[in-house]
Image: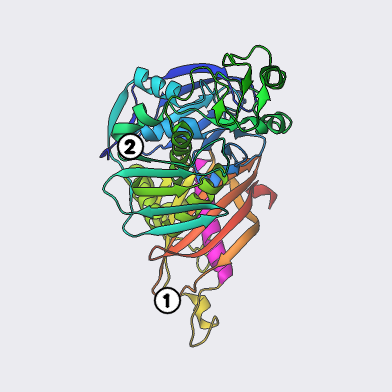
């Protein structure tokens, strides 16, 4: 696998229609700094909101993978093809600008995105490329989809499809080496659907930009030529036949590969699994995958590999961002003994709106005298307060005039206290700003001891003028 992070040499654009929305869109790929990751930017909106290519940003998986900024009105549909191209070409850091809510579909494959990357050129960066090494077998089942990940020295994928229909035979395909095979063997594989699905898709806010020029249509019901044209449109480049039988396709020229549908499902799987945030050094084997199952599988992996992912992310942040001593912290927030519950800030990442704080929990904490005698446990409300203070440091460090502002806790949702915190523990608190409207903000907060998650919460707070309190 590539050992150094990679981005693009220069920005490059491509225009066309989105497959499902039908919206005219221009996508522009731009170089990005080290440890930036892949981010979509809706440049058609005044605020130019960013959407991280993360499984935490998945809004829906109906016929495509849709990401959101946190505000459900700010979305990007059909992200899997561009993400697959970036992953397959080893592009770790990239700004993906869009003038609408869906990338152009091109010919239904990832070829046009690969062509953009080739035209731009690849720039090797100085930072080490982080990847997740699989050292044991993981298995996951969702509905009739099954996934297995096994150790490997390379990034490998195997996909088996079975639609239980005579129209498409059972098939299996393996990508042995992403670096060597993706561009030629899998990027050209086009998206597909069955003829019987078209009417329903047309009436459920799908395939508004679809045509035989950007999707394969597999015949699963006998149909005469005129019937087909009535369904898909008179101007479609239909294969020259009077009728279409089961186990044929409507497109001129036939399949690009005998197993093209399986290859496209593998292409989708690469794009969806890239939402984990780091490439996997291992062999992913998927039976009957689909976007919903893929995303659930990635969430399962995220949970199983959480300590590894958090450690990589923390190391990235510590390499490139700022830290704060206790003196710096006291210059920013007004809390003092016995209610200052942050000892140090390890890193602040303003690009990702995230912060990592530390608190050493000692037996001398005043609350241990009463909570509980002979069984000291840090109160859950103080763990919540510690994370809120770390979030406040992130906000106040970004404000122009610190002396006039306070961050007030408004509430917390989905609070979970998973393990007790006792004297001698060192808390590592990772807090990320997930949304902001005017002076109201939302945080995602997690607290760890020895890489083990002990507390998590969704925190709401308000930035207020000190004079109003």
Q: Which residue is mark 1?
A: 423
In the picture provided, is 72 more to the left or to the right than 149?
right
Q: Position of residue 60 (x, y in %)?
A: 62, 42
The magenta region covers 380-398
Above or below residue 262? Residue 429 is below
> Magenta stretch containing residue 394, yes or no?
yes
Q: Residue at position x 40%, y 58% from top?
A: 138
Quadrant in the picture for residue 63: top right
Residue closest to the eye, 138 or 265: 265
Above or below residue 252? Residue 313 is below
Label 2 neighbour load within 10 Å: few <14, some 14-19, many 20+: many
In the picture provided, is 394 more to the left or to the right than 413?
left
The answer to whether residue 32 is seen in the rendering is yes
Residue closest to the eye, 67 or 246: 246
Q: Earlier in the sequence, mark 1 or mark 2?
A: 2
Label 1 neighbour load within 10 Å: few <14, some 14-19, many 20+: some
Residue closest to the eye, 386 or 19: 19
Q: Position of residue 347 (x, y in %)?
A: 39, 49
**Circle 2 SS class:** helix
Quadrant in the picture for residue 67: top right
**Circle 1 SS class:** loop
In the picture provided, is 25 more to the left or to the right than 190?
right
Measure the alpha-carbon separation of dots 1 and 2: 48 Å
- Main SS of residues in magenta: helix
The answer to whether residue 334 is seen in the rendering is no
Q: Report the label total.
A: 2
Q: Residue at position x 65%, y 28% from top?
A: 222
Q: Residue at position x 60%, y 42% from top?
A: 61
Colour scheme used in the picture?
rainbow
Above or below residue 79? Residue 306 is below
Q: Residue at position x 51%, y 74% from top?
A: 378
Q: Which residue is mark 2?
A: 178
């Amino acid at each position: 696998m590539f050992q150094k992070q990679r981005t693009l040499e220069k920005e490059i654009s491509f225009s066309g229609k989105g497959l499902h929305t039908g919206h005219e869109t221009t996508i522009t790929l731009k170089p990005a700094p080290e440890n930036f990751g892949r981010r979509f930017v809706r440049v058609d909106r005044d605020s130019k909101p960013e959407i991280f290519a993360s499984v935490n940003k998945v809004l829906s998986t109906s016929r495509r993978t849709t990401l959101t900024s946190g505000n459900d009105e700010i979305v990007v549909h059909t992200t899997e093809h561009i993400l697959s191209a970036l992953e397959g070409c080893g592009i770790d850091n990239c700004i993906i600008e869009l003038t609408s809510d869906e990338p152009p579909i091109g010919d239904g494959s990832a070829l046009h995105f690969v062509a953009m990357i080739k035209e731009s050129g690849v720039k090797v960066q100085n930072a080490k490329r982080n990847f997740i090494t699989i050292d044991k077998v993981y298995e996951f089942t969702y509905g009739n989809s099954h996934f297995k990940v096994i150790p490997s020295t390379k990034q490998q994928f195997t996909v088996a499809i079975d639609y239980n229909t005579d129209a498409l035979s059972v098939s299996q395909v393996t990508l042995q080496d992403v670096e060597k095979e993706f561009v030629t063997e899998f990027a050209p594989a086009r998206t597909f659907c069955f003829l019987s699905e078209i009417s329903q898709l047309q009436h459920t806010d799908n395939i508004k930009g679809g045509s035989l020029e950007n999707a394969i249509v597999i015949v699963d019901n006998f149909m005469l030529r005129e019937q087909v044209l009535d369904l898909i449109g008179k101007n479609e480049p239909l294969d020259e036949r009077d009728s279409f039988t089961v186990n044929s396709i409507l497109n001129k020229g036939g399949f690009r590969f005998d197993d093209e549908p399986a290859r496209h499902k593998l292409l989708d799987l690469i794009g969806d699994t890239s939402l984990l945030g780091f490439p996997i050094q291992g062999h992913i084997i998927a039976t009957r995958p689909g976007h919903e199952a893929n995303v659930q599988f990635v969430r399962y992996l995220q949970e199983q590999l959480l300590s590894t992912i958090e450690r990589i992310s923390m190391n990235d942040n510590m390499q490139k961002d700022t830290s704060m001593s206790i003196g710096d912290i006291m210059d920013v927030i007004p809390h003092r003994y016995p209610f200052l519950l942050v000892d140090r800030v390890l890193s602040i990442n303003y690009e990702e709106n995230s912060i990592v704080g530390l608190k050493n929990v000692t037996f001398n904490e005043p609350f241990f005298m009463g909570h509980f005698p002979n069984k000291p446990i840090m109160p859950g409300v103080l763990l919540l307060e510690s994370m809120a203070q770390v979030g406040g440091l992130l906000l106040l460090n970004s404000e122009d005039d610190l002396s006039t502002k306070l961050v007030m806790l408004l509430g917390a949702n989905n609070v979970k206290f998973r393990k007790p915190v006792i004297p001698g523990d060192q808390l590592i608190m990772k807090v990320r700003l997930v949304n902001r409207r005017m002076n109201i903000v939302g945080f995602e907060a997690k607290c760890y001891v020895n890489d083990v998650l002990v507390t998590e919460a969704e925190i709401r707070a308000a930035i207020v003028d000190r004079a109003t309190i």
